[in-house]
Amino acid sequence: MSDGVLRLAEDNILLDMTARNKEGALQELAAVLQSKHPQVSLEAICQVLRDREQIGSTGMGNGVAIPHGRVEGLSRILFCFGRSLDGISFDAIDNQPVHFFFLILSPLNVAEEYLQNLARVSRFLKQPEKRRLLRLATTRQEIIEIFGQAE
């Protein structure tokens, strides 16, 4: 798993999201990835994410949410990181606003790798020190370096 699974592209990082609610956050994150994968519609991605949220919020507490879903038409797993300095109400399990979003979109046929990535991101973002560093980061490159420390 040390093959850079959490490697983020600079243009897949939002340092200061503008969304103010859950739906807006999902759309803002989805739009980043969809812009580079025009074969998949933004509405299709958002619908997959909304369907997943209806099962249960992906807001895992401590200011973290990991929206995720499997999307038809993708050829590989995609990542996007977004930070909301103000925090967004996201129905998180601790009812606290979410500041850190890690969106994972997966093709339909890569279940194991998808679940490994989900677990890895979850473990990483549960670490208070990593969240502190993400909060303090001022550039996309710093964010990349912080995620590069995931084992």
Image (tube, rainbow, N blue to C red):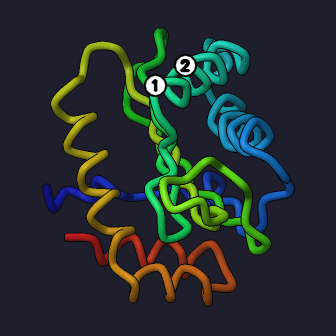
Q: Is residue 51 left or right of residue 117?
A: right
Element type where label 2 sits in the image: helix
Q: Is residue 75 above or below residue 62?
A: above
Element type where label 1 sits in the image: helix
Q: Where is residue 27 drawn, in percent x and y? A: 74, 35
Label 1 is placed on what type of residue?
Ile
Identified at 67% across, 43% down, the residue is: 29
Q: Where is residue 119 drawn, in percent x and y? A: 24, 50
Residue tagged by mark 2? 51
Asked if the residues shown at circle 2 and circle 1 are in contact, with their CB atoms under 8 angstroms apart, the answer is yes
In the image, which disc is placed on residue 94?
none
Identified at 68% across, 38% down, the residue is: 26
Q: CA distance from mark 2 to mark 1?
A: 7 Å
Q: Nearer the viewer, residue 53 or 4?
A: 53
The quadrant of the image that shows the C terminus is bottom left
Residue tagged by mark 1? 55
What is the crowding at mark 2: few (fewer than 14 residues within 10 Å), some, or many (at least 20)? few
